[in-house]
Image: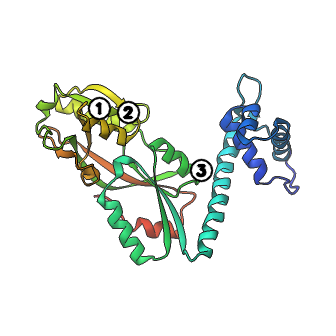
Amino acid sequence: MNHGRKPTRLDLRHLRYALAVADAQGFRAAAEMLNIAQPAISKAVKDTEVDLGFRIFDRSGPRVIPTPEGVVFLDDARQTVAQFERTIRASRQNAAGARGHIIVGYSALATSHQISEALDAFHRSVPGVQVEMHVMSTDNMLKNLKSGAIDLGFLLSHPTVGAPGIDQMPVWSSRIGVVAPAGEAPSRVTDLSEMPFVMGLRENWRSWRALLDSACDRAGLTPVVVDEAWDVQVILQRVAERRGVTLFPLSMADSLPAALELVPIAGMDAEATISMAWSIKADTGLLRQFRNHFPPLG
């Protein structure tokens, strides 16, 4: 292993190629993904391993997988590349007159007037900062927070949601209600026992479905799920088509189409808590200013 202190020969190209191999789980697939010759990627990764003094990938199996040392390197490389790209983008925006740039991810379940009101207050107190908002799944949000692709996230607070190096602060809670066509929503949990449900796919809505499982168990309800979808808009469309009802936080009521209503359910007092999440490593003064406009819950 090389313990010397010679200057590194590595640059962003080496990091990008190594990340492509990790994401594609192979050199040939990475070459196709980047549309370059495979020998160029193989040489760049080999040069990176020589420079670092350890193997990034284990090539002994049918798939190329990172070594334990490679996992650490790739995590840092992903954050470095994301930070570089964000620096370039922010610099261009600063040259155009912006005073900062924040990228925010949010779960569809976090759609609420709390975000828009706090954003308005933030822009009044810190004018000129551009805030990008992107809806994404909780898993992608945690991944993007860790890599530095986003700065902050609004996600469902749940024991299954978290990652090392990611801090969370609960910012609001909302009772869970039923979504149904306007004028047709049941008012009691007993009315739901024989109604069909449209739910988010469990593999994509893991924490929300786990929270609903517990809430329904406590209320003595076993939902009859007849349809599942990945996207929240598809779920709402299917409810509007009367394929079934669904359960969402009451804080989403103002964002629903006029054809739907979201109302409380007597007999179900469960709540959904939304937390703001950020990378401890990538925290900045500007992000702290932003968070100060969202008082912690409690």
Q: Quadrant of the C terminus?
A: bottom left
Tell me whether circle 2 and circle 1 mark residues in contact (CB < 8 Å): yes
Residue position marked by numbered label 3 in the rendering: 147
Q: Is residue 196 left or right of residue 11?
A: left
Residue 295: tell me if it is visible: no
Of marks 1 and 3, the one in the foreground: 1
Answer with the quarter of the image where residue 190 lies: top left
Q: Which residue is mark 1?
A: 198
| Mark 3 residue type | Ser
Task: Give the residue at x 54% y 75%.
Answer: 99
Say few, some or many: other residues with alpha carbon within 10 Å of mark 3 (under 14 / 14 to 19 / 20 or more).
Answer: many
Q: Amino acid at mark 1?
A: Val
- The local crowd at label 2, few if under 14, some if 14 to 19, many if 20 or more residues have their Cα within 10 Å, is some
How far across and how far down the image is residue 150, in percent?
53, 55
Secondary structure of the residue carrying tag 1 is strand
Residue at numbered disc 2: 229
Please indicate whether residue 156 sits to the left or right of residue 2 in the image. Answer: left
Residue in view at x 13 percent, y 37 percent: 186
86 or 7: nearer the viewer: 86
Name above or below for residue 185 compared with residue 227: below
Cα gap from disc 1 to disc 3, whole angstroms: 33 Å
Q: Is residue 257 above or below residue 41?
A: below
Q: Nearer the viewer, residue 187 or 182?
A: 182
